[in-house]
Image: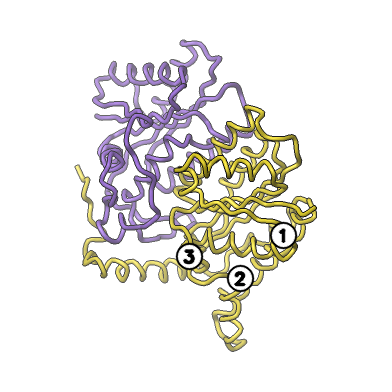
Chain colours: A yellow, B purple
Amino acid sequence: MNKQLTFLMCSPRGDKSASHSIGSYLVSLFEEKEIIVKTFGVYKTLKNQEKTEEMIKSIDDSDIVLISSPLYIDQAPYMTIKLMDIISEVFQQGKLSNKTRHLFAISNAGFLEYYHNSLVLKIYEQFAKKNDLIWAGGLPIGAAGTYATYPIPEFLKMMEQLPEDDYRQEIYNKPTKILDSVIRSSVKHLSKGEIVPKDDLQKLEFIPMPLESYVKGANSTWPEAAKQFGAEDKLRDKPYER
Amino acid sequence: MSYVILNGMYKDDSFIPEVNQIVSEEFQQMNYKGATLILHDKEIKPCLGCFKCWVQTPGICIIDDYGREVAKKMIQSDILVYLTPITYGGYSAELKKAVDRSLGLISPFFRVYENEIHHEMRYDKYPHLVVIGTLDEPNTEQEEIFETLVKRNVLNLFCEKYSTLVIYRGDDEDAIKMKIKSGLAEIGVKR
């Protein structure tokens, strides 16, 4: 009998988000391994009682639960915490069948450094512990905005076109290749009912470029983004100053 | 001096109102002016992750509901108190709903601070932060996560002084008062 996975996509930005893009990539790899996947966009699902019950039923039937969520101010967003509360409630009420289920999580942030996500992965681990889910590990992903625009396979194809000595090989291609290999290894282990070895996950613990370079590049995007709203000169406004 | 308490309790919690009362009385006895916001009573929609509080209406969330008022009260207070049941080591959903909506209080621009990337300040002055978490009983793992979370928040929200308190449901009133007085003293609030 085929294994089942419930994918809980926890970004309010829907399919424009890195949470969707990265999570969907894992889903495609799980499907290649003939795992049945049921996907729930959490922001829409939790607004609807019937959909929420469908999600709980899917979790009940699943061998793997996959959470993909952005990082908002050092933690998961409100709706991800609410989701955990709802799942905890049904677990605590003994409404779910007795079954081995693994929890795997993806946390992504706009900061360059992976470790801004480390704490939220510990929070997911506590959530798993409370609810008899087996904590299988998580992916802490920094500078994730790139993958919202370019899904990982597409991004790697683009990078293939670059000359070998291009500077972007080191700061974009190499990190994405490492991420891709960790994702593939995670899917392989989870598909076999195993937790993902810490050694594999630790391969993501690196900073791909100097912090100052990232800051310079990222900061140049804000005035451009504000321009379409005529707000480029107001970016440093203090509307609530006393 | 002013304070605001963001009370992130869930509706059926009977313990947190007691803690809230004790904190409020401490502030009142020192002639601080302020208020408690019971967040589950307020209409606060979830953050959309749209960054329009950074690029369209800088500093103000585009959602026109009580979330805006909470952010304004946060930045205009001298002391900001988060009161929350510790939830898997983190904040409750009710508290987080309001905190998410305060993103506009910081600048979109990044900077390197203490060898890490953080955002720049939008305002010249930010409140001191007191974070009070409640637990049914001691839980070392969750308490460590909670304390680290507060430290991370302080880095990102530019609080000059802060304290973290964990109060257990089994604590009696005297123990709770002592913890609160000690937490407030850490940020310089004392009689």
User: Which tag, 2 or 3, sits closer to the chain's start?
Assistant: 3
Question: Circle 2 — which element?
Answer: helix
> Amino acid type of disc 3?
Gly
Q: CA distance from mark 1 to mark 2?
A: 16 Å
Q: Chain of mark 2?
A: A
Question: Circle 3 — which element?
Answer: helix
Instruction: Name the residue at the left extreme.
Output: A242
Q: Which residue is identified by label 2? A: A176
> Amino acid type of disc 2?
Thr
Q: Which residue is identified by label 3? A: A145
Q: CA distance from mark 2 to mark 3?
A: 13 Å
Tell me which residue sits at (65%, 48%) in the image: A65
Residue B85, placed above or below residue B116: above
Side of A84 relative to B106 (left or right): right
Side of A75 relative to A2 (left or right): left
Asked if badges 1 and 2 are on one and the same chain, I answer yes
Q: Along the line of sight, which residue is nearer the eye, B27 or B101?
A: B101
Residue A64: horizontal and vertical position, in percent?
69, 49
Residue B126: horizontal and vertical position, in percent?
31, 42
Instruction: Name the residue at the front extreme.
Output: A50
Quarter in which the C terminus of chain A is drawn: top left
